[in-house]
Each structure stands twice: as C-alpha cells, then as structure tokens.
Amino acid sequence: MSKNIFILLSRQRSGTQMFRDLIRAHPDISITGEIFHSNREGKNNSFFNFLVSNFNNDLNSYFDALASPKIIFNSFLESILEKSKKEKVLIDVKYSSVHHFEGFWKELNEESNLFKLIKKAEIGVVHLIRENYLENYCSALLAKVNQNWSAYDSERKVDKIYVNTGEMLDEISKREQEVSVIKKVFSDYAAYKEIVYEEILDSSGNFSESLQHELKCFFDINQSHDFLRRPRTNKTAKPLKSLIENYDEVKSVLSVSEFSDMLD
C-alpha cells in the first residue's frame, strides 16, 4: 500500500489547488481534496465520513481503535485506495490538520503521531512550501475577507486588504517556524520531497519540465504521460503593492526586519 499512497503536506494558501490541478491530469495518479476538512458533505475521502461509516456512533469501538491509531490510519488509507480509479493517490493534508491521530496522550513537544505513522509506513511526502510568507499571509487575509478560500481571482468581490503590521510580523514568523518544524521532522526521511510554490511554473507560465520529471520519478509513474501543461487557476493574485491598501506602511516595517526580501 505505501508505494501507492503519498501525502501532500502544506499550509493553506500555498498553491495546493493549482498543484493538484497540474498533477491529476496524469493517468497514473489521483489526488484527494483536504481529507480533514470540516465540510465533509458529499466528500467520499473525508476522514470524518470514514469514522462515521466505520464506527456508526459506537464510541466504545472508536476509543478502542484510538488506543492504536495505526489501525484507523491503515484502514482509512486502504479505503481511499479502494475508491480511487487510478493506481496511486496523493492525499492533501494541511499543517493545521495533523493532529487527528494523536490517541489519548501526547507530550506537548512530541512529534505528531501522524508523522510517525507516515514514516513507519514509508509513505512518500511532498512538502509544498510557499516561501514568500508575506504573500501567503496576504492570500489568507484576502480569502477571509471574501469568505471564499478557493475562488478564482475573477470571483473575488474584494480585491484589496488592510494589513495590521504588528500582527503581520507574528504571522510571517509563525509560517517560517512551521516550515522549519516540518523540515526537521523529515530531515532524515528518504521518501520526502520539497517543492517550492514559486518554482512550480517556468518563466512562460508552464509547469516546469524539470520538476515534472522529478515528480514522475518520485511517484514512480509513467514518464511518457504528461501532467497538465498550464494551470487552470492563477498562480498569484495581483502584486502586493496593488493588493495591500497600506503598502507603504507594510514596506516601512518589513524593510527593517529579517523579512525585507518578501516585498515586491
């Protein structure tokens, strides 16, 4: 099973929608949406729908299984593979959702049990990183003000945001720390591949040929079949200078910080 299952790990607003669109065009690999998303209505691969169908409100059985999270983990992955029409599956997991296999007890600074299960099963991990943390933060603000986290640029009613500069530095720093944690967790893990969001497309807006080759090797899928050449969604929103209402204030604060390189 482990050779046919892969995890796409990232923070929200890191380009997973675009990346999934590019990858799913290949005939050998399918991609799930966010398996731990709270909106589980009609989602065949929802972890929460899996729990409902398997435990049917029987809390005693669920608690028994939770004492050994590996049982739930393996059963859930097997259910995803069974539903897939392709040989291999890439599963979308966000940083904020890695706590669902923790069991009853966990030390405060202990590694996520999900990561332990992934490594024990030797499941491949694709870590998608949006290195410009300011853009990631602004994208999150834009999604929040529009109350739409998956909209195309043309569907947004609000296209400008105000950035609280005090909060901004904390949020950027938090993103940097999150990435560092994930890198450390998988630093000695062979089946791990980092992808930088800003490098997915080449200068012409096409899916990077070299990255396509690397991914086909990583997934061990047919090199002669192609991914999608160009994304259906826009890679980026408008330039930060046009997006941020108080850009001059943001620039002034960032220019004297360690994150000055994240400005346009």
Image (cartoon, rainbow, N blue to C red):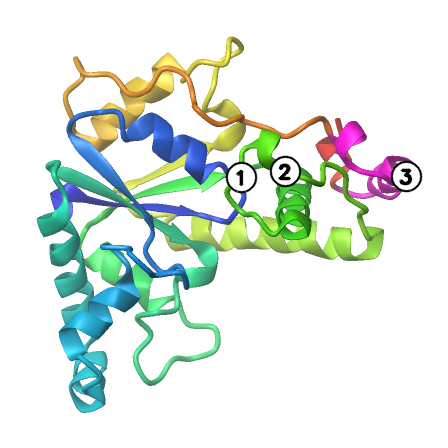
Mark 2, residue position? 156
Residue 35 occupies quadrant: bottom left
User: Is 57 or 178 nearer to us in this picture?
Assistant: 57
- Residue 63 lies left or right of residue 180; in this view the side is left
Mark 3: which amino acid?
Ser
Image position, residue 255 (x, y; %): 85, 37
Q: Is there CB contact under 8 Å for labels 3 and 1? A: no
The image quadrant that residue 251 belongs to is: top right
Q: What element does badge 1 sit on?
A: loop
Rendered view: 70 above or below 186:
below
Q: Total of numbered circles in the picture?
A: 3
Q: CA distance from mark 3 to mark 1?
A: 30 Å
The quadrant where residue 190 appears = top left
Choose the circle earlier in sequence order: 1 or 2: 1
Q: Magenta residues, as a range?
A: 240-258
For mark 1, does the 10 Å Cα neighbourhood hold few (<14), some (14 to 19), or many (20 or more) residues?
Answer: few
Helix, strand or loop status at disc 3: helix
Which residue is situated farthest in the bottom direction here? Answer: 60
Identify the residue position indicated by label 1 in the image.
Answer: 151
On screen, residue 202 versus residue 81, left or right, reads right
Q: Position of residue 219 (x, y in %)?
A: 21, 32
- What residue is drawn where x is 9% and y is 50%? 82
Q: Residue at x 63, y 36 (%)?
A: 132
**In the rendered structure, does residue 192 fall within the stretch colored magenta?**
no
The image shows residue 189 at horizontal and vertical percentages of 30, 47
Residue with the mark numbered 3: 252
Which residue is outermost to the top?
204
**In front here: 107 or 78?**
78
**Circle nearer the N terminus (3, 1):** 1
Residue type at the position of mark 2: Arg
Say which of marks 2 and 3 sits in front: 2
